[in-house]
Image: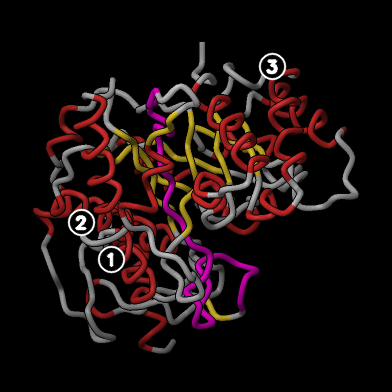
Amino acid sequence: MRKTTVLIILSALLISCTGKAVDDIFNDDKGDKAGGDAEQERLYAWEKERTSLLDYDNMVLIYGGGRHRTYKWDEEAFQPYVTYTDEGGIEHWLFDCFLFLEIKDGDAKTFAKGYTEIPANLRDWRNLADYYFDSSMSLGALNRAVGAAMKRMGVPDCKRKVVISIPEPIKGQKDWGSVSDGIMLDFSIDLHRIEACKWYIDYVRSKFNQMNYKHLELAGFYWLAEQAGTTRTIINQVSRYLNELQYTFNWIPYFVSGGHKEWETLGFNYAYLQPNYFFTESLPYSRLTDACQLANVYGMDMEMEFDERVLTGWGYRLKDYMKAFKENGIWQNKRLAYYQGGTALYQLARSSKHEDQELYHEFCKFVVESVKQ
């Protein structure tokens, strides 16, 4: 038996016996440890105070971190997502939760199976998290946008919630990176895939603690893979780790994807079903009613979907979502997630066209008034 094989088996046995998360953060391929066991295993202040999982009504998807993105999430970009000013000049809080995610890095690396052929490695995962915690953009900009709104509106009833996506540990990858004792994780081994996820969770927790945001609360994490697929064997262990720390585990499977019916058994706390109606004009309105019925049958929440095409004549399809969600017991009864392409809502808010402004107000009122009863 080769020496490397022995080391991998011993590593898997050690992880299985100890149940510890990966403790090391590596700055190069050899592994430059930053932080130790005590820092990684301790609970942060907000974790000690939290007695249950957090809830939220309206979660907007914020894509960023890939080089292919032509926009930046600065304070000005976040403003239309934080608050909404109606036709009478009254300003309202808008989304209460922000999901930060990315599917690829723009340089041929993918954070989930199916987008490019080259799986992202440890360094790519860490760079993505570092992008979210860049003080000038992303979470820092959102924190400042909320603070600026508070000066105008006063303190909201709760901090704005933040959910961070976990890249998919793609089955079979063998070059992700090294962990304790310099052993390269092998993603054909489920224990190694789980430990990579735990490392990422702990890294995000430590960065959030370091930044000390006044107006944001780390509420949970999101599983980037949109079907159970080869991740179904590890999801429950990741969920258990998160729930022990009082974080929610969120999922947004596409329409009738593998695992959507068993989302609770898999280990997710909140699962939002994608109707996938907006993007194909040939799909009939019945797709929305079918999706609503599925969500009601399986106890799922739902995602509303639109992108920049709402500004070029596709606004009627966004209106279809609002109509169907109201008619089928989704609005005011379910948690809602909002896919809006890149910055479609920002563009809608800033558009000078009358029809765009009408759609913008209709949509924002739908969000503001959709708080669960």
Q: Nearer the viewer, residue 169 or 76?
A: 76
The answer, for residue 265, to whether it is visible in the render is no
The kind of secondary structure element at disc 1 is: helix
Picture residue at 32% right of the left edge, 59% below the top? 132
Mark 2 or mark 1: name the one nearer the start of the chain.
1
The kind of secondary structure element at disc 2 is: helix
Q: Position of residue 19 (x, y in %)?
A: 29, 51
Q: Position of residue 208 (x, y in %)?
A: 21, 50
Type of amino acid under label 1: Asp
Spatial CA distance of label 3 from label 2 is 39 Å
- Image check: 350 left or right of 134? right
Occupied quadrant, residue 55? top left
| Residue topped by disc 1 | 130
Closer to the camera: disc 3 or disc 2?
Answer: 3
- Image check: 307 left or right of 15? right
Type of amino acid under label 2: Lys
Type of amino acid under label 3: Gly
Q: Residue furthest top?
A: 373
Mark 3 or mark 2: name the one nearer the start of the chain.
2
- Residue 332 located within the stretch drawn in magenta: no
Q: Nearer the viewer, residue 79 or 290?
A: 79
- Residue range in magenta is 90-116
Q: Quadrant of the N terminus?
A: bottom left
| Residue topped by disc 3 | 329
The kind of secondary structure element at disc 3 is: loop
| Residue topped by disc 2 | 207
Please, is residue 206 above or below residue 170 in the view?
A: above
Counting other residues with Cα less than 10 Å from the Cα at mark 2, is it few (<14), some (14-19), or many (20 or more)? some
Q: Position of residue 309 (x, y in %)?
A: 69, 54
Picture residue at 62% right of the left edge, 46% below the top? 353
Occupied quadrant, residue 251? top right
Asked whether the residues under the numbered discs 2 and 1 touch, taking CB atoms below 8 Å apart as contact, a structural biologist would say: yes
